[in-house]
Image: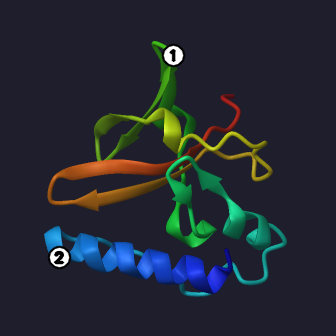
Amino acid sequence: MTHRRCLEVFSTVAFTVILVGSATGRDDGRYAGSPLKPWFDTLKSGKGLCCSFADGFAVADPDWESKDGHYRVRLDGEWIVVPEDAVITEPNRAGRTMVWPIKNSLGTTIRCFMPGSMS
């Protein structure tokens, strides 16, 4: 799937989310020169492509954990269980924990989650 197609899919999802609540997405080109950008653009979980680094963000170690065999991430002060199919299973080349949340009127779900190394 091309990056253009990924952006089209993201645009469709974002438009749908906007219809039922608020959503934010950003693809302002700030990471265009990053050597990891092509890798981020192809990252996917069982839920599909995560789209790009700009759609996700790094999570500090105190804001994620593994509990009872599942990952959890703290977003906006709330702990959210990461669905198994949202976990990215390939090695983390960025090193930092990353999350791609989807927020709507029903709450927050996790599209992709990439664990880092807890230090």
Within 10 Å of disc 1 (Cα), the crowding (few <14, some 14-19, many 20+) is few
Q: Locate residue 50, reporting x and y percent.
A: 56, 61
Residue on which disc 2 sits: 19
Quarter of the image for residue 12 reads bottom left
| Marks 1,2: beta carbons within 8 A | no
Viewer-proximal residue, 89 or 107? 89
Q: Is residue 33 above or below residue 83?
A: below
Residue at figure coordinates x 41%, y 55% from the top left:
101
Q: Residue lying farthest front?
A: 1
Q: Is residue 30 visible?
A: no
Inspect the image, locate mark 1, and give the three-letter code of the amino acid beneath it.
Gly
81 displayed left or right of 91: left
Q: Residue at x 15, y 69 (%)?
A: 20
Q: Position of residue 84 (x, y in %)?
A: 50, 33
Q: Identify the residue shown where x is 61% and y is 86%.
A: 4
What amino acid is found at the position of numbered circle 2 in the picture?
Leu
Residue bearing mark 1? 69
